[in-house]
Image (cartoon, helix red, strand yellow):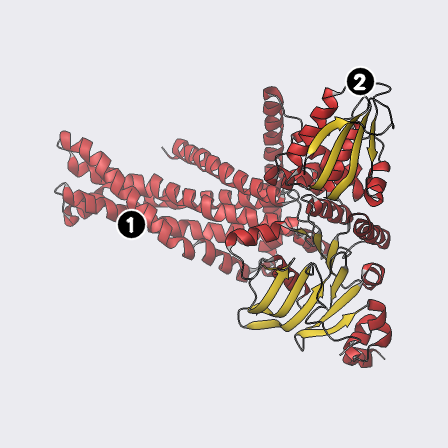
């Protein structure tokens, strides 16, 4: 176990945590990816879910969003269960979450501006001018103002992700979940994206849950990290990334943060 | 939350300033009436300074920020400026960093084309498609010749897999369509022939129509909708996922790797399916003719006198031609797919429509040259 044990409860506070995962058991069919996982994300916090490829990071995010039903346990969004919610409550809870998928998931038939305006078109009574202004301000916040008239097929990977963040923010969701925001980006674009995340937290107080295994990004943005392990199918570490790197006695955590190859690979190569 | 205009209580910015008070929470879901009320308040005070009091706001999201920015950026005469007071510094920083003149230009919208532009673009597109199709057929011919000379280069395992999917798995639908065609033709002609006492000659019509025309034709239409569309979607998705580029960078020809197996499989599957359609179609016709007083034996005897091997061979040759055309069009549309899911959909639609048009054209040519 690493620096700190996974938190299963939080001190009594006036407002419930933004997200609370309680004794979650998840998987597909008979395959269990994660069992008895518990952690909380406080409002205004940036939590990073990390771990090697195939450990279930993106699946955990999709369970938090309510796209998949867990095998057991509960997930609370702002104190309300998304697992046991009625269909109407489930939809309302999903609308309270802004999600950026790995590829940006922009709609290919709409321009960037129309993509960002899309949630406003669907769920608000604002006039077209008001929606356009809101969407353009959102794009400016993620430094995408110049690309508003472009189609998604004309954007680079980093631009797709930033436009995806702008669309996720459109309904004023104060909890944003980002799936691999830095993956496949050049260091400068990735650093710009990290800066955008920090700036949005600073100015608007957003809560972020970020799935990533990019070490530089983790150390830049994360207040706290939870690390998943595919072998034990559990959370093996939780705490500040710097503490996990410097103080963890768990070899799996040290191997991850020190970017060490598996022993067999290491032996073969030396 | 409420938006209200009240007389200014302070001396700043002017004694006669109007005041818009924003309070409570402004979110995407609550902003619409507040936004229009605030703009109405500005409109009612066109020549007075206006103070927007944001000190009582509990929470605003991006829409709330846009609302306040919209009030600030409204064009006003000198001495009638809009001043925001009491806004939390973190929000103030967001708004103050934006030039009020920004976004003065309306966002670009996609231009709707006129009728002439659409006709011109469609014509140019069809000409380009025809040119690309000729080049594609030439390339296929070259690769096919190359595959014949180097016998190992055609992937026969792929051919069998595709032929199974396109042929064997299509048997139920082809049987159903073929049978119904035989029944319909026999019934429709039978009703007319009955009036002239020539019911027995309906057998001739059913036999010739199914073997020469309807068997291959209906099979081809099913094949175009089922297999031609699948070829375009499969190769189109591979193009979008850059699998086609990966094949090219291995030094392989996408035509040899992706197209030839599908072409050969289609040329094998189509005549076999067509024969099945012929058989069940004739059988369906025979069943109907029983209702008109023609026994199975009479039907059989009349059929043998009505058709010959030539009718059957023409049907088979047509089926091969249809299969080659459908596979070629499906593969070519797949390889010319652009970027994104929409392009795959367009390629698939185009493949089916072009295939059906080609089927009719090929049928017409056969009719001319074999009559």
The x, y position of residue A62, in whole percent, is: 63, 59
Q: Residues within 10 Å of mark 2 (few under 14, many from 20)?
A: some
Label 2: chain letter: B
In the rendered image, the residue lying farthest to the front is B9
Above or below: residue A58 compared with residue A37: above
Q: Which residue is mark 1?
A: B280
Q: State the separation of the CA atoms marked 2 and 1.
A: 86 Å
Please determine whether, in this image, residue A43 is positioned above or below residue A130.
below
Residue B338 location in percent, x, y? 65, 42
SS at badge 2: loop
Tell me the quarter of the picture where residue A16 sits.
bottom right
Indicate which label's residue lies in the foreground, 2 or 1: 2
In which quadrant of the rendered image does the C terminus of chain A lie?
bottom right
Does label 1 lie on the same chain as label 2? Answer: yes
Q: Which mark is residue B47?
A: 2
* Subunit under mark 1: B
Residue B205 is at least partly visible in this image:
yes
In the displayed structure, would residue A222 be above or below residue B335? below
Q: Is residue B38 above or below residue A260?
A: above
Residue A229 placement (x, y as % from top left):
70, 73
From the viewer's perspective, tell me whether residue A100 is left or right of residue B211: right
Residue nearer the viewer, A95 or A147: A95
């Amino acid at each position: 176990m690493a620096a700190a044990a996974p938190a299963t409860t939080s001190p009594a506070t006036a407002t419930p945590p933004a997200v609370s995962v309680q004794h979650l058991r998840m998987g597909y069919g008979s395959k269990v990816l994660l069992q008895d996982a518990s952690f909380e994300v406080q409002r205004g916090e940036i939590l990073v879910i990390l771990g090697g490829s195939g450990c279930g990071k993106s699946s955990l995010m999709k369970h938090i969003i309510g796209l998949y039903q867990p095998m057991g346990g509960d997930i609370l969004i702002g104190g309300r269960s998304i697992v046991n919610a009625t269909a109407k409550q489930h939809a309302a809870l999903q609308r309270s979450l802004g999600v950026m998928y790995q590829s940006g998931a922009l709609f290919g038939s709409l321009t960037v501006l129309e993509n960002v305006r899309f949630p406003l078109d669907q769920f608000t009574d604002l006039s077209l001018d008001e929606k356009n202004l809101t969407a353009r301000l959102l794009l400016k916040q993620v430094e995408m103002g110049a690309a508003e008239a472009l189609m998604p097929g004309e954007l680079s990977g980093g631009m797709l992700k930033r436009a995806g963040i702008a669309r996720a923010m459109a309904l004023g969701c104060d909890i944003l979940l980002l799936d691999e925001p830095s993956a496949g980006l050049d260091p400068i674009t990735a650093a710009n994206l990290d800066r955008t995340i920090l700036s949005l937290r600073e100015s608007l107080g957003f809560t972020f849950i970020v799935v990533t295994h990019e070490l530089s990004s983790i150390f830049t943005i994360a207040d706290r990290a939870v690390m998943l392990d595919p072998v034990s199918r559990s959370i093996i570490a939780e705490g500040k990334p710097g503490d996990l790197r410097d103080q963890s006695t768990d070899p799996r955590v040290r191997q991850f943060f020190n970017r060490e190859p598996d022993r067999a690979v290491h032996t073969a190569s030396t | 939350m409420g938006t209200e205009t009240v007389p200014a209580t302070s001396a700043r910015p002017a004694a006669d300033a109007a005041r818009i008070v924003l309070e409570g929470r402004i979110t995407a879901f609550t902003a619409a009436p507040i936004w229009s009320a605030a703009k109405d308040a500005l409109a009612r005070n066109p020549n007075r300074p206006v103070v927007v009091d944001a000190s009582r706001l509990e929470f605003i999201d991006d829409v709330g920020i846009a609302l306040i920015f919209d009030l600030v950026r409204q064009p006003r005469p000198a001495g009638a400026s809009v001043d925001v007071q009491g806004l939390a510094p973190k929000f103030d920083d967001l708004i103050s960093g934006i030039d009020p003149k920004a976004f003065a230009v309306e966002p670009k919208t996609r231009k709707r084309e006129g009728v002439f532009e659409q006709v011109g673009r469609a014509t140019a597109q069809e000409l380009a498609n025809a040119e690309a199709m000729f080049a594609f057929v030439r390339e296929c011919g070259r690769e096919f010749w190359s595959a014949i000379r180097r016998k190992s280069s055609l992937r026969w395992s792929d051919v069998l897999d595709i032929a199974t999917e396109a042929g064997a798995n299509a048997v139920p639908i082809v049987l159903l369509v073929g049978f119904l065609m035989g029944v319909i033709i026999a019934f429709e002609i039978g009703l007319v022939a009955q009036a002239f006492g020539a019911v027995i000659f309906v057998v001739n019509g059913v036999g010739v129509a199914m073997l020469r025309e309807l068997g291959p034709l209906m099979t081809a239409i099913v094949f175009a909708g089922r297999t031609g569309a699948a070829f375009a979607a499969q190769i189109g998705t591979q193009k979008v996922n850059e699998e086609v580029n990966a094949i090219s960078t291995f030094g392989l020809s996408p035509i040899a790797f992706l197209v030839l197996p599908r072409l050969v499989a289609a040329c094998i599957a189509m005549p076999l399916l067509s024969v099945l359609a012929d058989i069940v179609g004739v059988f369906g016709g025979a069943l109907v003719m029983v209702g008109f007083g023609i026994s199975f034996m009479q039907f059989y005897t009349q059929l043998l006198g009505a058709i010959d091997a030539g009718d059957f061979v023409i049907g088979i040759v047509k089926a091969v031609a249809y299969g080659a055309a459908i596979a070629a069009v499906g593969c070519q549309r797949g390889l010319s797919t652009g970027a994104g899911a929409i392009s795959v959909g367009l390629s698939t639609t185009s493949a089916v429509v072009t295939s059906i048009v080609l089927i009719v054209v090929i049928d017409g040519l056969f009719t001319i040259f074999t009559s």
